[in-house]
Amino acid sequence: MRRSHFLMLAALAAAGACAKKPEAIAPAYISPTTYNGFSCRQLAAEAARVDAALGSASAAQRKARSNDTAGVILLGLPVSTLSGDNVADQIAQLKGHKQVLQQSQIRKGCVA
């Protein structure tokens, strides 16, 4: 009985260490002054670049999460998180940039 409780607690702890869903990752703080010198055209180009990078990072994070889930089930370890495939920090940074870019575009009157 004790062994099953221990295994259950270990599995729960390992599952808690799994990579987060990209949607669940909060944006990092990016200074609002980062894009002050950008024109509307530059802001749009940078927003497109950030969106593309966020899409790629989100796909990588979903794969890391899937691998972590499989690793926990098969090995009891979140393999992607342990191997460095978890890109949550990168996603947080990109989400922060996306927010600041949107705010900059609104402040400069770039969006209708």
Image: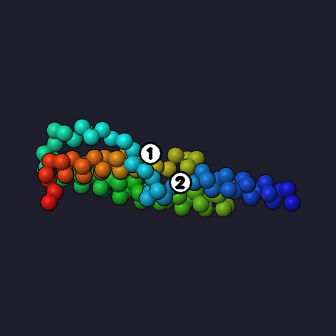
Residue at the location (58% across, 57% down)?
Answer: 68
Q: Residue at x 16, y 57 (%)?
A: 111
Label 1: how many Cα within 10 Å (few below 14, some 14–19, many 20+)? some
- Tell me the tag on residue 61: none
Give, as a three-letter code, the residue at label 1. Asp
Label 1 close to label 2 by CB (< 8 Å): no
Q: Residue at x 67, y 52 (%)?
A: 13
Q: Quadrant of the N terminus?
A: bottom right
Q: What kind of element bears circle 1?
A: helix
Q: How many marks?
A: 2
Helix, strand or loop at mark 2: loop
* Residue topped by disc 1: 89
Q: Is residue 43 visible?
A: no
Query: Mark 2 or mark 1, which is nearer the start of the sequence?
Result: 2
Q: Quadrant of residue 56?
A: bottom left
Q: Is residue 23 left or right of residue 80?
A: left
Q: Residue at x 52, y 46 (%)?
A: 84
> Residue 30 appears at what percent x and percent y?
33, 41
- Tell me the tag on residue 19: 2
Give residue 27's position: percent from left, percent from top. Answer: 39, 48
Display colour scheme: rainbow
Query: Whole-Å distance between the Cαs marked 1 and 2?
Result: 11 Å
| Of residues 2 and 85, the one drawn nearer to the viewer in this rendering | 2
**What amino acid does circle 2 point to?**
Ala
Q: Position of residue 9 (x, y in %)?
A: 73, 54
Name the quarter where the C terminus is drawn: bottom left
Residue 40 visible, this orientation: yes
The 10 Å Cα crowd at callout 2, few under 14, some 14 to 19, many 20 or more, is: many
Q: Specify whether 34 is left or right of 96.
A: left
Where residue 3 sits in the image (x, y, percent)?
Answer: 83, 56
